[in-house]
Image (cartoon, coloured by chain):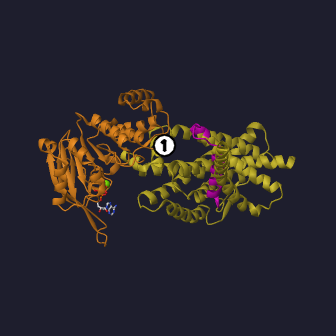
Amino acid sequence: MAQFLNASVGGISLGLIWGVLAVGVYLTYRILDFADLTVDSSLATGGVVTAVLIANGCTPILALLASCLAGSCAGLITALLNTKLKIPAILAGILTMSALYSINLKILGNRANVSFFGKPTINGYWADLFNLSLIDDKNVLSIITCVIVCSAVVGFLYWFFGTEFGCSVRATGFNSTMAKAQGINTDLTKIVCLMISNGLAGLAGGLLAQHNQSGDVNMGTGTIVIGLASVILAETVIRDRFSFWLKLALVVLGSVAYRLIFTFAVQMGMHTNDLKLVATAIIVIALTVPLIKKKIAHKKLKGGLNNVKN
Amino acid sequence: MLKIENLTKIFNVGETTEKTALNNVSLTLEEGDFLTIIGGNGAGKSTLLNCISGVLSVDNGTISLDGEDVTHLAEYKRAKYVSRVFQNPLDGTAGGMNIEENLALAFRRGKKRGLGWGITKEERVLFHKLLSETGLGLESLMAQKVSTLSGGQRQSLALIMAVLVQPKILLLDEHTAALDPKTAKTVLELTQKFTKDSKFITIMVTHNMNDAIKIGNKLVMMNQGNVVFQASGQEKQNLKVVDLISKFSEVGAELNDRILLNS
Ligand SMILES: Nc1ncnc2c1ncn2[C@@H]1O[C@H](COP(=O)(O)OP(=O)(O)OP(=O)(O)O)[C@@H](O)[C@H]1O
Ligand SMILES: [Mg+2]
């Protein structure tokens, strides 16, 4: 039981880190309606930037900001490929993703990973502040960091999407024909949204690197599946009438739920190699539940009608 | 003043499917003019409107507005002067946003969109007042998603949005064609109400020849990318549907059922 609880705390801390990424994925897939695959690499870019910076003595917060910025640059490239060179969204994302792999290796100095054990991390602040152990309470420290970061991200986005520019990003996603007819520069709205989304992916990568105290060129593999799974899990409870900040918060919780399902599966004796299978299963189940619900509702309705007839 | 000179638009240049959709079209409209355009399928009516709004680039010719050459001005920049209502009621509004948010977007047409609030309290009050004046009952649905509205309500909203900020040109491309006859009538009446005594130019494409004669002060008939007949003022008011039909057959235009049934 204690072991399970411990594992759950680990799951929650990872879930919150990846929650930042999930919010980014939500912005592109659901708000801008742009299938962006860049995040697979921009998350790793964020991770390796933080790793290299901290290893070279940079302060942890500055490293996180740099990760965020590096991620946005990746988003900018995908956006430019799509809007200016008219390359389809998915292909633009794949191209950037593939190019970033080489760039990430270059950032790492042609190594596959860089560790910075013993160097200060953002979690170290709380360790000092609350007298916790950097090693034993690692997950708790991460949770403190991520709750702050996620709140800041949700707050920022809630404000941003209420502004004139934020509204024009939403309009672009809902109906780009209308957006252009209303004088919205849809190229610009796409560029900005992709930069924010990938900036969040970079930030998540930075947080993950600080959590692991290392950055790895492969740390982003499968990111998009994780992000989508979190969004889809969240959407099983998100309702249209919910306030935007609540939707975003639920997306973060979707990511936590996703991790906890994993934790549970592993505790039940599943091999970590099979995790991808579970990921796919989660997505498929989450996507089919609404369909099944509809079928059941339909059957009930039909049954009701038959009863009336009889 | 809208001045269109020798406008030519060719699709798929150099391919076997090459098609001249506009062939040296020239047209001049003055402030307050209301032009109706009729013509068979593929006559080039939508293409002309899409060139004016900047959706399509032109192959030859110029479009100028009050002396400014806007031929190559980007679509979203031209939106400052040109507003539109589309044939499909789903195209003109953002279904996932509510009525007041849609209005707030239209309220900023032609202005910079920065980091100020996307909609303000004063605007809500203003929109409520404006919607009440149209008598469609939309003011009680301000916070409702546009996707929950009927086609007619959506098209009325699109029309309100198009004139919320005075354009220089209002383009209506068969904006009542997708509606049932009764709703179409309501939207057409709203159109007349908004354009009556207006300072801007209105161009309306329609398949209904009665409407084309009755509404507006100018009329052009198009066929195969050419303007084949023009009328204005009293001459236009005196036209009869039979006159137009004989004009159509004079130029050998194929009249589709839609035009005949609508007339
Ligand atoms: N994007 C396009 N690519 C190729 N050809 C096109 C394109 N758009 C229009 N055309 C062709 O140009 C011609 C004029 O089309 P347009 O849409 O302007 O006709 P229209 O007068 O609006 O007809 P309708 O009454 O059917 O709406 C047609 O032959 C059409 O097939
Ligand atoms: Mg047309």
Q: Residue A212: horizontal and vertical position, in percent?
A: 72, 54
In this rendering, position of residue B252 left or right of residue B110: left
Residue B132 percent coordinates (x, y): 39, 28
Q: Is residue A226 magenta?
A: yes
Residue B152 in which image quadrant: top left
Query: In the image, is residue B219 above or below residue B41?
Result: above
Q: Which chain is yellow?
A: A
Left or right: A247 in relation to A163: right
Image quadrant of ligand 2 equals bottom left
Callout 1: residue from which chain?
B
Magenta segment: A220-246
Outermost front residue: A310
Lateral position of residue A290 relative to residue B62, left or right: right
Q: Residue at x 49, y 62 (%)?
A: A92
Instruction: Answer whether residue A209 is magenta in the image.
Output: no
B198 over B40 or under it: above or below:
above
Question: Does residue B3 appear anywhere in the picture?
Answer: no
Q: Residues within 10 Å of mark 1 (few under 14, many from 20)?
A: some
Q: Position of residue A87 (x, y in %)?
A: 45, 62
Q: Residue furthest left?
A: B235
Q: Which chain is orange?
A: B
Name the residue nearer the viewer: B128 or A39. B128
Mark 1 vs ligand 2: CB under 8 Å?
Answer: no
Please tell me in which quadrant of the rendered image residue B196 appears.
top left
Q: For the C terminus of chain A, which image quadrant?
A: top right
Which residue type carries mark 1? Answer: Ser
Spot occupied by residue A185 in the image (x, y as percentages of width and height): 39, 48
Residue at image mark 1: B147
